[in-house]
Image (cartoon, grey):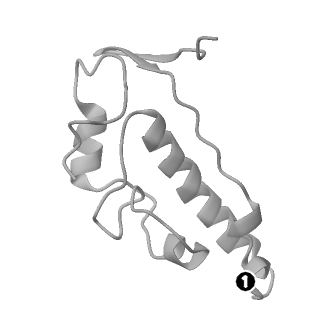
Amino acid sequence: MQPRRLHHTTDQGTLWCTHVGVASLYRLLPEYAGAPQDIGRMRERLEKEVLHELGHTFGLVHCRQPWCVMAASRLPEEIDLKDLQFCDACAEYLQRPGRGSVVGGRDHPR
């Protein structure tokens, strides 16, 4: 079975994506770690994780900049330390014209 091909057309051409990202609320809830319920913190974590997963669908790999939204997060508290944006290198990769079919970010500057 072929994966469904998603695309997004920009003024620089069409970006094709065959990847899927999943973000779960379960481990993002502050009460998961025994903290009091905090809807604002959970919402901010979810926004960062969704942006992170979208980055993967467009070929980005984990970034070494700890504040970049593409940095790996093993614990929910690590998500809190990240910005809700890509570092310059990740943003530049996403804006490169002519990337064609995204297959894994092999040329991403780590």
Q: Nearer the viewer, residue 41 or 35?
A: 35
How many circles with numbers are drawn on the protein?
Answer: 1
- Identify residue type, mark 1: Ala
- Provide residue 34's location: percent of width, then percent of height: 77, 88
Question: Around disc 1, counting alpha carbons within 10 Å, would you say few (fewer than 14), some (14 to 19), or many (20 or more)?
Answer: few
Query: Which residue does the image show at 45% across and 76% down from the upper left?
Result: 81
Give the side of residue 106 with respect to residue 6, left or right. Answer: left
- Where does the N terminus fall, quadrant-wise? top right
- Provide residue 77's location: percent of width, then percent of height: 56, 79
Query: Which residue does the image show at 66% across and 73% down from the upper left?
Result: 41
Determine whether 20 is above or below 75 in the image: above
Determine whether 13 is above or below 94 in the image: above
Quadrant for residue 60, please give it: top left
Give the side of residue 94 with respect to residue 25, left or right. Answer: left
Give the side of residue 74 with respect to residue 94, left or right. Answer: right
Query: Which residue does the image show at 40% across and 55% down from the upper left?
Result: 70
Quadrant for residue 20, please give it: top right
Give the labeled residue for mark 1.
33
Furthest toward the front, the residue is 1
Give the side of residue 48 with respect to residue 28, left or right. Answer: left
Determine whether 95 is above or below 62 in the image: above
Q: Nearer the viewer, residue 89 or 44?
A: 89
- Provide residue 9's location: percent of width, then percent of height: 42, 14
Query: Which residue does the image show at 53% across and 58% down from the upper left?
Result: 48
Label 1 residue SS: helix
Determine whether 107 is above or below 110 in the image: above
